[in-house]
Structure formats: C-alpha cells, structure tokens
Amino acid sequence: MIVLPGTTVDGAAQVAETLRRKVHEMEMKHPSGELVTISLGFASTIPGRSAAPTELIRAADQALYQAKQDGRNRAKQAGVLTLVQNTPKD
C-alpha cells in the first residue's frame, strides 16, 4: 500500500502506471521463466470526519482484483467514493 496525501486521482493514476511500467522494464523473470509484472488498484477521496479509512482501502483492493481479472499487468481505478456518513433527511 502506498498512501499519497494531497494527491488527485489523476496523480494516483500516474504513480500507479509509473510503478507498473518500471517493474515491467526491469524484465525480471519468475523461476518459471515468465516475466514478472504487477497489477495495481487505486482509489482517491476527500474524507469527512466520520469517514472510515477502511472503505478507501477496500475500494483500492477491489480495483486491484479487477485489474487482475482484466488481464494483469495493469493499473485500475476504483469507482467514485464518498466517505461521508449519510445523514437522515428531515
């Protein structure tokens, strides 16, 4: 996990893609002979006072698994998050 405070979702996407590309360019080989790659999931939000940080982590984790399902060696953004507790309407 990498925490990037004050970073926009575009900035997070750029960091994720740079990491993915750098690992790919290293051309490391797995003992099986396959090229080592990474997949990444990322999420961004502006939290509220009642926000649960675990929700942001969960969203990034779901994006990671989606990246793997989509074919690996890629970065995937989580859906839009609002970590603000819903307040009842009067």
Image: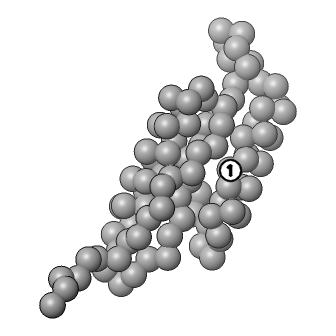
At a point 49% along the width and 37% down the height, the residue shown is 66
In the visual, does 30 lie left or right of 68? right
Outermost residue toward the top? 32
Q: Residue at x 50, y 52 (%)?
A: 78
Asked which secondary structure carries label 1, the reply is helix
* Residue at 48% in and 61% down: 80
Please name the residue shown 61% across and 29% down the image: 72
Residue at the limit of the structure toward the bottom, as seen here: 90
Indicate how the structure is coloured in the image: one colour
* Direction front: furthest residue: 90
* Image: 11 above or below 84: above
> 36 or 62: nearer the eye?
62
Would residue 73 appear left or right of 56 to someone viewing this image? right
- The answer to which image quadrant residue 2 occupies is bottom right
Horizontal and vertical percent position of residue 90: 15, 90
Residue 21: x and y, percent? Answer: 78, 39
Q: Report crowding for label 1: few under 14, some 14 to 19, many 20 or more residues within 10 A (C-alpha).
A: many
Q: Amino acid at mark 1?
A: Ala
Image spot of residue 50 (x, y percent) = 31, 80
Residue 1 showing in the rendered view: no
Along the viewing direction, whichever of 31 and 41 lies nearer the viewer: 41
Q: Which residue is mark 1?
A: 16
* Furthest residue in direction left, as rendered: 90
Tell whether 63 sits left or right of 16: left
Where does residue 58 sit, x and y in percent of width and height? 39, 53
Q: Tell which of 74 and 23 is nearer to you.
A: 74
Q: Is residue 20 visible?
A: yes
Q: Quadrant of residue 53?
A: bottom left
